[in-house]
Amino acid sequence: MGWFFLIIAGAFEIVGVIGMNLINKYGNLKSYIILFIGFFLSFGSLALAMKTLPMGLSYAVWTGIGTVGGTIVGMLFYKEPKDWKRISFIGIILASVIGLKLTS
């Protein structure tokens, strides 16, 4: 169950980052609600994951999911650059997260 909660935590981390971007663009109450709900559920799920997974592993995977997810969302929906360097480094992060999973 730890890995399930960790993936959910990473997904809600992405929601929180989307909320941050919406606050930058609009600054309305809906944007703040998305940010707070996203991060609240992300931290809650991370705490549940850390009941069965080591802290270092959990934090590394959580930040990796958030980083990759936030970057992909930015490229797909917010017209951020899609050059080969960014995609290559996303691949490195993904490979690292998979490596952590395989070694735990």
Image (tube, grey):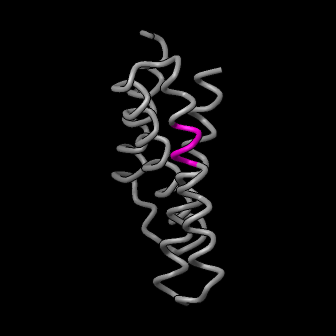
Looking at the image, residue 85 sits to the left or right of residue 74; the answer is left
Q: Residue at x 46, y 62 (%)?
A: 82
The residue lying toward the viewer, choosing from 74 and 39, is: 39
Residue 24 point in image, percent of width and height: 46, 83
Quarter of the image where one finds residue 1: top right
Q: Is residue 45 magenta?
A: yes
In this rendering, the answer to whether 20 lies above or below 95 is below
The residue lying toward the viewer, choosing from 75 and 43, is: 43
The residue lying toward the viewer, choosing from 18 and 2, is: 2
Looking at the image, residue 59 sits to the left or right of residue 29; the answer is left
Q: Is residue 92 magenta?
A: no
In this rendering, the answer to whether 58 lies above or below 22 is above
Q: Residue at x 52, y 88 (%)?
A: 27
In this rendering, the answer to whether 11 lies above or below 28 is above
Q: Quadrant of the C terminus?
A: top left
Q: Residue at x 48, y 12 (%)?
A: 102
Residue 85 point in image, percent of width and height: 33, 51
The residue lying toward the viewer, choosing from 46 and 99, is: 46
Q: Which residues are magenta?
A: 42-46
The count of marks equals 0
Q: Residue at x 49, y 57 (%)?
A: 70
Residue 43 point in image, percent of width and height: 51, 46
Q: Predominant secondary structure in magenta?
A: helix
